[in-house]
Amino acid sequence: MRMRLGLLTVALLAFVACSAPPKRTTTASAPPAPAASGALEPAPQGALQVAFLDVGQGDSALVSFPNGKTMLIDGGETDQGVALVGKLRRLGVQQIDWLVATHPHSDHIGGLIAVLNAFPVGEVWDIGMPFESPVYRDFLLAARRAKSPSGERPRFRVVRRGLTLEPAPNVRLSVLAPSDPLLQGTRSDPNNNSLVLRIDAPGGSFLFTGDLEREGRRRLYESRPNLRADVLKVAHHGAENGTDRAFLNRVNPAAAVIPVGAGNRYGHPHRETLALLQGRRVYRTDLHGDIVMRLNTDRKLQITTTRRPPTQATASAKPAPTVGAVIGNRNSKVYHTPDCSQLPKPANQLRFRSAREAERAGYRPHKCVQGE
């Protein structure tokens, strides 16, 4: 199996293209509008639209450029593929000009397999990192079998820092990471070698960070890129190791988007990340559903969501349940967050997928659940 996967990767990476030289860009700042309930619909002519799609515990974002070209960044798990294709059709997609896999983990590339089978694709972007995984193997096979709008095989491009693209007039896309040589020996090499993309357009800018972690951020800083952006796609689903204060100070976003699944077993987004993001507009796919951000010709950022989150009044009346797994104490019938300093002994622990599940079983929250 290892040799097969390696040979397949090498075969597909033969389609590597040369990178264009980096160019400097500037961006204007625009405060986001309040979120409102809406439906997925195609971008208006002349608008730049970024739809952060709810694919459960995974990432996916469709960028629709003012000239009608499209870029799909990640696609969630394989079981999200059919739903993802349906959402893309509702957004008016007929072809994907650039299909981007930020790194080879299944919660980012699994759904792209169905997309490659359903739409013509112009280019497939990948970090070209050897990675043994049945899902990554299937992704590479799907890229090999896919058709471009001309009927031929899509171009397969291994992408590195320095590549710039002008997908539409006055719109600039810059690849900020990874750099050669790829990082090795980190806590998660695929995460730390994630593609980091910046999009600048009249009226606003977007920063996509994949699942970048601490080591990847340190490498990113070495090239001194312009990280300032109006909208930040928060790294690693809001994990504590995906964001820190130094990074937020560099980006200084007006709005942040956390792609995350409801009641996920990882406890994402972590409380440390949410605390760092206080004072900014935070959108989460587990609460808001699909999140559509649109820069119209008036250069103002409009934000709509397909699900209306709990109102502030509701939130103040009763704290929202903890998102993610919790640990119950069999003896006291109290449940804790996994990082609580007063967890029961292992023999007395009972794991629940969510606070709601624990409460249905008769458990009540420990003070650490409320952040006390």
Image: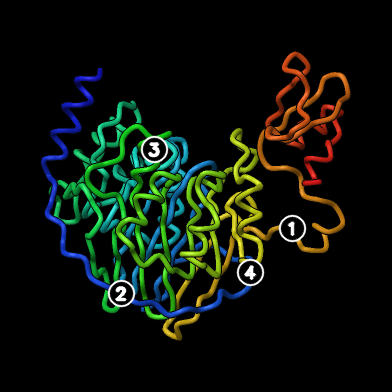
Q: Could you tell me if the residues under marks 3 and 1 are in contact, i.e. CB atoms within 8 Å? A: no
Q: Position of residue 85 (x, y in %)?
A: 41, 48
* First in residue order: circle 3 vs circle 1: 3
Q: Residues within 10 Å of mark 3 (few under 14, many from 20)?
A: many
Q: Residue at x 41, y 51 (%)?
A: 217
Label 4: which secondary element: loop
Residue identified by numbered label 3: 110
Q: CA distance from mark 2 to mark 4?
A: 31 Å
Q: Could you tell me if the residues under marks 2 and 3 are in contact, i.e. CB atoms within 8 Å? A: no
Residue type, mark 4 in image: Ala
The picture quadrant where one finds residue 340 is: top right
Residue identified by numbered label 1: 310
Q: Position of residue 20 (x, y in %)?
A: 16, 62
Q: CA distance from mark 1 to mark 2?
A: 38 Å
Residue type, mark 1 in image: Pro
| In-front residue for pair 326/49 | 326
| In-front residue for pair 272/39 | 272
Q: Describe residue 223's horizontal placement relative to residue 60 as left or right.
A: left
Residue identified by numbered label 2: 25
Q: Position of residue 223 (x, y in %)?
A: 30, 59
Q: Residues within 10 Å of mark 1 (few under 14, many from 20)?
A: few
Residue type, mark 3 in image: Gly
Its colouring scheme is rainbow
Q: CA distance from mark 2 to mark 3?
A: 33 Å
In this view, 165 is above or below 126 = below
Q: CA distance from mark 3 to mark 4?
A: 30 Å
Q: CA distance from mark 3 to mark 1?
A: 30 Å
Q: Nearer the viewer, mark 2 or mark 3?
A: 2
Residue type, mark 2 in image: Thr
Disc sitting over residue 36 in the figure = 4
Q: Residues within 10 Å of mark 4 (few under 14, many from 20)?
A: some
Name of the residue lying farthest toward the top: 347
